[in-house]
Image: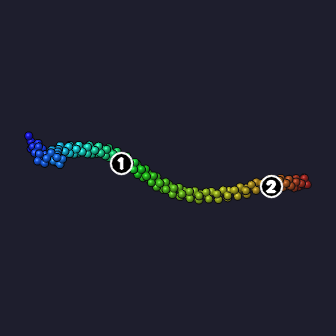
Amino acid sequence: MGLGEILAIVIPSALGAGGLGAVIVTAIANRRKVKAESEKLDAESEKIAAECMAVLAEAYEKRMTAMLTSIERLDKQVEELKNDKQVSEDTIVTLKRENAELKIQVTGYAADVDKLTKTLKDRDKRIVELEKQVAEIPALERQIADLSARLDELHGGNDGTAA
């Protein structure tokens, strides 16, 4: 017999077979059982906590992996957008330069257009003058014909009187 069993017999005898003694004896006798159950519950709690930590760690690892993948994808997009922006800025600079060059050309062309417009106006004036002169040709031809006829009459009249 062990010490616990002896105490379980002696103590109730000393206190009597009544209620308080039985409670004390039962508590002492059950103390190991309660301690073992408490240790078992502690071990189960630790196991559940470890499983929860493992599940959470796995979930967070998956989430971190997804976030890192997303970050890498977004970094690539940002880099592409930076490149696109640089290309756009380069294009803007080139277009501004070309625009300035074209403005200079347009200014030169405007001067050329002014010169050509003046030349055309002068030519048009000359054409109008020539048209007026051409319009006078039939009248001059008639005058020449009249004068030729008169000359012929004068020469013919001198020839006929002298002959």
Q: Residues within 10 Å of mark 2 (few under 14, many from 20)?
A: few
Residue positioned 24% across, 45% down in the render: 45
Residue mark closest to the camera, 2 vs 1: 1
Q: Picture coordinates of residue 126 (x, y %)? A: 70, 57
Quadrant in which the N terminus is drawn: top left
Q: Residues within 10 Å of mark 1 (few under 14, many from 20)?
A: few
Q: Earlier in the sequence, mark 2 or mark 1?
A: 1
Q: Nearer the viewer, residue 28 or 82?
A: 28
Q: Are marks 2 and 1 in contact (CB under 8 Å)?
A: no
Residue 56 located left or right of residue 94: left
Q: Quick one: SS at disc 2?
A: helix
For residue 112, which quarter of the picture? bottom right
Q: Picture coordinates of residue 27 (x, y %)? A: 17, 46
Mark 1 = which residue?
A: 71
Q: Nearer the viewer, residue 100 or 142?
A: 100
Mark 2 → mark 1, Cα distance in angstroms: 98 Å
Mark 2 = which residue?
A: 140
Which kind of residue does numbered mark 1 sit on? Ile
